[in-house]
Amino acid sequence: MRRQTLVSTVVLIMACSAIMAIGLASANRPVRVLVLGDSIMYGKGQTVPWWTHLPKGHVVTNRAVSGATSADVLSEQVTDVRYDIAIIGVGRNDMNRDVPLSVYKANLKRIIQSCNARQIVVVTPPLKLGLPVSRQQQYTDAANSVFWPTVDLADAVPADERYYVDAGHPNSGGAKLIGQAIAQCLRELE
């Protein structure tokens, strides 16, 4: 009986040690981040891109493309590769091309369902200078309705030309605010 208890104790200690080793290994592993979206997520106009402001240890694969709509992201950017986090930022070009909200929302849901990631964050576009806020708010509301963690860039980046290289693309100052807002969301998810 004592020998059986001793063997059980040794096995339990070995199992706990293995679990701790696995935990430490994954704690030291980089966080793999997939970025999908349009020119804002791509970093157009940003000499220092927004993702450089993410926490250390986050390794970014950026598949975003300038000019992409939600349909483009769905057909050209989604991948089977497994990631820890997928950050999806699309909607500005849908808005510019008058894509119906119902189509945008359906595409966004399909993008989310297609992502092979442990956690997904949806990023809404920053304000486009000169475009009615009410129109932009409709797309933000549609993104928020998918019930994933959402980072609202209209709140993060002021509608002030000091933060933009043109009417719709944040500069490096705007990119810093984008990166900080996304980083804050990621910290809240941990």
Image (cartoon, helix red, strand yellow):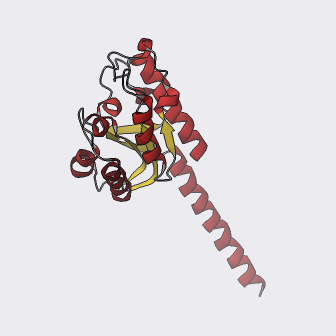
Question: Splitting the image into 4 quarters, where does residue 4 fall?
Answer: bottom right
Question: Splitting the image into 4 quarters, where does residue 87 fall?
Answer: top left
Which residue appears farthest toward the bottom when viewing the image? 1
Judging depth in this view, the residue of 53 and 156 nearest the camera is: 156
Question: Splitting the image into 4 quarters, where does residue 139 fall?
Answer: top left
Judging depth in this view, the residue of 12 and 184 nearest the camera is: 184
The answer to whether residue 20 is above or below residue 144 is below
Q: Which residue sits at x=43%, y=41%?
A: 138
Q: Which residue sits at x=62%, y=61%?
A: 17
In the drawing, does residue 68 fall left or right of residue 141? Answer: left
Q: Position of residue 145 (x, y in %)?
A: 48, 51
The answer to whether residue 165 is above or below residue 15 is above
Judging depth in this view, the residue of 109 and 52 nearest the camera is: 109
Count of marks overlaid on the render: 0
In the drawing, does residue 91 fall left or right of residue 176? Answer: left
Q: Position of residue 19 (x, y in %)?
A: 59, 61
Q: Position of residue 180 (x, y in %)?
A: 52, 28
Q: Is residue 55 visible?
A: no
Q: Which residue sits at x=57%, y=62%?
A: 18
Q: Position of residue 178 (x, y in %)?
A: 46, 28
The quarter of the picture where the N terminus appears is bottom right
Q: Which residue sits at x=32%, y=17%?
A: 166
Which residue appears farthest toward the top when viewing the image? 162
Q: Is residue 15 visible?
A: yes
